[in-house]
Amino acid sequence: MSNLSRRNLLKISALAAAATALGANQSDSNAPSWDGEYDVIVIGSGFAAHAAAVKSAMRGLSVLMVEKMGRVGGNSVINGGIFCVPLSPKQKAQGINDSRELFFKDTLKAGRNLNNPALLELIFSRANDALNLTLECGAEYRDFLEQSGGHSVPRGYKTSNGTGAGIIQPMQARFKSLPNTEVKTRTKFDKFITDDSGRVVGVEVRENYRFDNKLFDDDRENKSGDKKLYRAKKGVVLASGGFCADKVYRKLQEPLIPDNAQTTNHSGATAGAMLEAFRIGAYPVHVSHLQFGPWASPDEKGYGLASKFNVTASFRYGISVDKKTSKRYMNEIADRKTRADKMFEIIGKDENYPIHFCDSRPVKHMLKEQFDKLLASGALKRFDTLDALAAEYGLNASTLKQTVAQYNEYVKQGKDPDFGKILPKDGTDISVPPFYAMRGVPKLHHAMGGVAINNKAQVLSSITNEPIAGLYAAGEVTGGTHGASRLGSNAILDCLVCGMVAGENV
């Protein structure tokens, strides 16, 4: 194939949306000179990508996984490792009453009723299938079920190592053990290659690519790597993740986000792959809804370990107080958006970070290694008395003790008339020293929006309102499932189910 004909073909990909809209009938009679071919190509290497890749390979298909960074896993490998599974075996064994109606009520409330009902039904109905896929790959979970914010009952399976790596690593091993599979890291996806009908038939990537976190806009400024063309005989699964680290695109959605805003995402979480899908005609959904994780700390960088303390211990079994009043100001286990909004109200412009704390009992639910590391970092502090805790953070000790006494009375009564928090059913209050506390701040965490998919994980075209042949998507690069704000621990559920479904249908 000549260089001229290859360029022509790529131009067809780049201009497909506009050309198809005009009814153009481009010809690709000169087939590209492929550098390799596979049945399925998966873009990305997080939860959704692994579910799609493993499921495809288990069907006997040849599968290539491409990842632009130097390691696999994306944000998935550093996340909190809490996997929401409604109507699970552990819930049944622990006597927890859950239902489809309760799961929908919780999820729709967090999503401000903007959730796509069909996708919500999909992740609910296939949750236990996704759980079984991870177990089959070798993932291990603790017996303790987490109750993330916004959930009416405990639903969270937590990995035995307390991070998403507890799922990614065994799935990666399983994928590599299957025949005709290959993983290419430092390989950046740039373009879809389509035929004259608009079907996605392959991808253009750059191998030996080096992400440069010193660049302001890596997707456009970084020219490293060697161009390759790979054919996908059955289809491409887009599972490239979210874009909370993309300084350009996130600011287009929320202009008030400063360029130096902290995020829990890894530095390569950018929008380039999603924008390429838009360019060939994929529908965009909810891309302006960005979520802040309310459980982070200003005293550590990135994701850190603060979430381990706040999700497992302080929010569920303790309280959060405003430094200026020494009083509570929110339901500590409300959905993420509700809590983040409340926290930003009191943080204001003078960095008045709230204080999250609990007593000695809840921290026993944390993994000891993570607890010890967080305490050693100085972000989490230990106090023998509430007076000492108040002195450290500049709180009014008398008011703080009144706040704690009032909260303890609410726990005893089983009802929080101030904020409607679901109180610990085991009676855990704040009374057994030592006490543990940290400063809190929300950080950019999850992009709600992305490409539109149907319940077969097929990407929908904004030109035809039909699936784009040969293109599937799953995980954070898609939009609609979570509405305006995702319920905590529903990300792993969404990623694994939709990735699995893509792998079944491609």
Image (tube, rainbow, N blue to C red):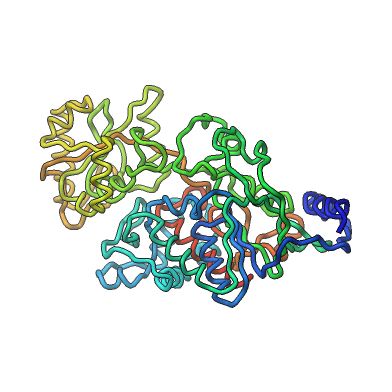
Picture coordinates of residue 55, whole percent (x, y): 54, 71
Q: Tell me if I can see residue 338 in this picture.
A: no
Up-down: is 302 above or below 73? above
In which quadrant is the C terminus drawn?
bottom right
Picture coordinates of residue 266, whole percent (x, y): 48, 44
Say which residue appears at 25% left-offset and 27% top-offset.
325
Picture coordinates of residue 85, whole percent (x, y): 39, 65
Q: Tell me if I can see residue 54 in this picture.
A: yes
Up-down: is 486 above or below 137? above
The residue furthest bottom is 60
Is 32 or 265 nearer to us in this picture? 32
Is 51 or 112 nearer to us in this picture? 51
Picture coordinates of residue 144, whole percent (x, y): 26, 62
In which quadrant is the N terminus drawn?
bottom right
Is 304 or 421 nearer to us in this picture? 304
Is 460 or 199 nearer to us in this picture? 199
- For this view, does 440 lie left or right of residue 196? left
Up-down: is 322 above or below 477? above
Say which residue appears at 76% left-offset and 62% top-offset.
34
- For this view, does 56 lie left or right of residue 466? left
- For this view, does 400 lie left or right of residue 320? left
Say which residue appears at 61% left-offset and 68% top-offset.
63
- For this view, does 101 lie left or right of residue 437? right
Say which residue appears at 71% left-offset and 69% top-offset.
233
